[in-house]
Amino acid sequence: MTGRWLASATILAVGIVIGGFALGDGIKRAQRADRAVTVKGLAERDVTADLATWTISYSATAPDLATAQASVDRDTVQIRAFFRELGFPAEALQPTGVNVNQTKDNGVVSFTVRQRVSLRTTDIKRAQNAVRRQFDLVRRGVMLEEGSGMAYTFTRLNGIKPEMVAAATRDARSAAEQFAKDSGAEVGAIKNAAQGYFSIEARDGDSGGSWGQSDTPYKKVRVVTTIDFYLK
């Protein structure tokens, strides 16, 4: 009887010891599984814009509306001739707005007609040439108002997103591996990831856009990802 009791007690004790080891090992594994490092990955790419838009604003002031409108119409003819001579199709230039303002100063009435036309083209080189020769419009008598500048846009972002996200992920893993090396661990799988946002800026840091300046077609696309990697 006593022997059986001792045997049962021994088995129970062994089970408790084994269970304790298993529990402790499980806790350690859980702790290791919860270890993670948060890093950021960067990817950049130089691109060239594929769309150019140029809004040209001009105006004329005269004592009567008909004279002011006639002056603006002459400017419109000169602007269309300018772009036609540069090789742009007629449909590339479209009117985008007109405004008429009447003022009275010391009993003298005057009318100001403002008009805007916009160039829209995917021919970037031709657009750059037009900007370089914009003073030709002044020689033709067209007085460009402030805000008349070329803007360049990169529209093919979706085509390069997957490659850039992959590059940013590789950059983040490289940072995580350095961190793990310094702490005596290894990098495991991704725990969480946030893509971040894509930005498109002038490659050389000056987007222009003010009077007498124009944007640049040379852009830099940038994305920063935030990734949590397991450490093991």
Image (spheres, grey):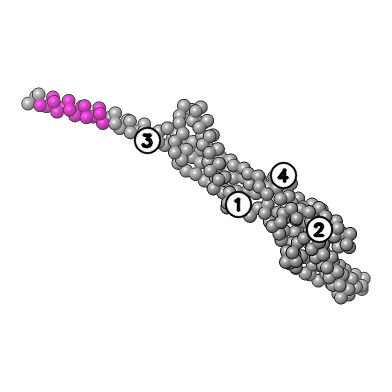
Residue ranking furthest to the left: 1
Q: Secondary structure at mark 2?
A: loop
Disc with the residue nearer the chain's start (2 vs 3):
3
Point 47% across, 38% down: residue: 229
- Separation of marks 2 and 1 at Cα, in angstroms: 30 Å
Inspect the image, locate mark 4, and give the three-letter code of the amino acid beneath it: Gly
Res 205 label:
4
Would you say residue 41 sits in the magenta stretch? no
**What distance separates the C-alpha of mark 1 from that of mark 3?**
41 Å
Pointers 2 and 1 in contact (CB under 8 A)?
no
| Residue topped by disc 1 | 157
Say above or below: 72 vs 222.
below
Q: Within 10 Å of the Cα at label 2, are there few (<14), some (14-19), or many (20+) other Cα atoms?
A: some
Q: Secondary structure at mark 1?
A: helix
Of the residues under marks 4 and 2, which one precedes in the sequence?
Answer: 2
Q: Residue at x 54, y 34 (%)?
A: 175
Q: CA distance from mark 3 to mark 4?
A: 48 Å
Q: In the rendered structure, which segment of residues is drawn in magenta? A: 4-19
In the rendered image of this protein, does residue 208 appear above or below residue 177?
below
Res. 146 mark: 2
Work out whether 23 lies above or below 149: above
Looking at the image, tell me whether mark 2 or mark 1 is earlier in sequence order.
2
The type of residue carrying mark 2 is Glu
Type of the residue with mark 1: Leu
What secondary structure is marked by label 3?
helix
Among numbered discs 1 and 3, the one appearing first in the sequence = 3
Q: Amino acid at mark 3?
A: Ala
The part of the image, by quadrant, that contains residue 232 is top left
* Residue position marked by numbered label 3 in the rendering: 30
